[in-house]
Amino acid sequence: MMRQVRRGQGGPPGGGGYGGPGPSAPPYGQVPQQPAYADGQGYDDYGDPHGYDSGYNGGQVYGRPGGGGPGGPAGPDPRGPRPAPNWRRRIKWTAITVVGVLVVTTVATYFWADSKLNRDVDLSTVIERPEAGKGTNYLIVGSDSRKGMSDEEKKKLHTGSAEGQRTDSMMILHVGGNGDTLISLPRDSDVEIPSYKGSTSGKVYQSTGRRTKLNAAYAEDGPTLLVRTVEFNTGLHIDHYVEIGFAGFANIVDAVGGVDITIDKGFKDKYSGADFEAGKQTLNGEQALAFVRTRHAFATSDLQRTKNQQKFLSALAHQVATPSTVLNPFKLYPTLGAGLDSLSVDKDMSLWNLASMFWAMKGVSGGDGASLNMPISGSSGGNLVWDKTKVKTLVNELNNDEKVTVTGN
């Protein structure tokens, strides 16, 4: 940085050294008089009363007037005051973003879940169907399907290795405006096999009046004959069909983190692997399967088992519909994946129908509906005979979507 200089005093006024006004020239051979240096002053002969660089030398830093900026005293921003944040605008755009993410996630989840449904039951092949009543009727079936299970899994779940496929549980769930009703159909129910159309051959097999256990209909020609047999022997129109196998049932229970249930009286069964004490407990998939399959531990084997099945399925639906599952993606998606992968439903079943079914089962477990066994009047050849009078009243109430007054066994 150059020091500011100040010329020294010249000779007599008008002494025009160097050809002009100013100090006189020095004698020949002598050094001219040097200008005097003065800190903080500029070249006063340029006519600037503050000097050439007085502001710089005086400590001013270029930036804000008054020396504001790094290293200088604060001062007003030459750009003016910053505007206050527009919180209404920020909240608006945050809300729009959140809603957009939720919509995209919901739509993506819907299509993902819808693609996992196994719609392989064609109810349009069922012949001579009764008129549809008010409300919606679901036939819910638990089969002993061992499809895809390893020998180790069969041993662990005590399923055995029997060939073929049978129904371990069958229920009708009526969803209507006067409360939902869950009715268990004992698999040993005495029924007539009606005329039906073969699911694979397409051939119509005429009725011979043959009577057998209800689960034999499924073993003979699968879901469509079972639906046909239930409709023929009850007079109820089945709107939707839902089936789940052994492995799928256990996987759903494990995915949801177990199901809380209160067992009134302890029991054991070496066939199903059940070994339960009385009281409230959380059942994992293996224990849950043993609980709903046990029959040999009870005097009224099939009837008590259907009651246990109703109780557990309602508890499972309640567990799946809790906020801790629905609002937790780490539980919701594994549960949906396990459940949807293992379900076999009719071709017209939508996710909305499926959700309605689960909410209805949750309502039944919460006391908003009724659950009962199909009314039984006695037995014949080891088969359970339905009480025709009570069944007729029950079917009439369901078809008209009235509050159910009939009680079962």
Image (cartoon, grey):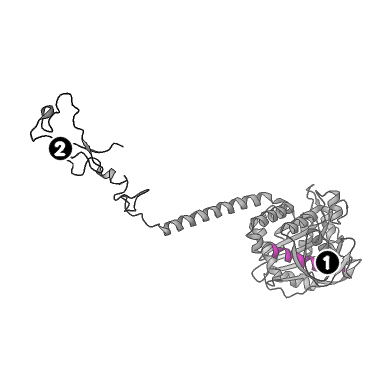
> What whole-number distance in Å separates the C-alpha atoms at marks 1 and 2?
124 Å
Q: Residues within 10 Å of mark 2 (few under 14, many from 20)?
A: few
Q: Amino acid at mark 2?
A: Gln
In the image, is residue 232 part of the stretch drawn in magenta?
no
Boundaries of the magenta span? 299-319
Residue 200 position, x and y percent, is 79, 47
| Mark 1 / mark 2, whichever is N-terminal | 2
- The structure residue drawn at horizontal position 72% and vertical position 53%, both measured from the top left corner, is 338
* Horizontal side of residue 207 vs 5, given as left or right: right
In the image, is residue 317 part of the stretch drawn in magenta?
yes
Secondary structure beneath label 2:
loop
Look at the image and tell me in which quarter the N terminus lies: top left
Query: Does the residue at mark 1 contact the one at mark 2 (Cβ under 8 Å)?
Result: no
Confirm whether residue 131 shows in the render.
Answer: no
Look at the image and tell me in which quarter the C terminus lies: bottom right
Q: Amino acid at mark 1?
A: Arg
Nearer-the-camera pick, 286 or 46: 46
* Horizontal side of residue 89 vs 198, given as left or right: left
Up the image or down, 182 lies above or below 142; here it is below
Which numbered marker is on residue 85? Answer: none
Name the chief secondary structure element in magenta: helix
Up the image or down, 171 lies above or below 344; here it is below
- The structure residue drawn at horizontal position 37% and vertical position 48%, both measured from the top left corner, is 71
- The structure residue drawn at horizontal position 19% and vertical position 32%, both measured from the top left corner, is 33
Up the image or down, 172 lies above or below 64; here it is below
State which quadrant residue 235 falls in.
Answer: bottom right
- What residue is shown with label 2? 9
- What residue is shown with label 1? 305
* Horizontal side of residue 96 vs 105, given as left or right: left
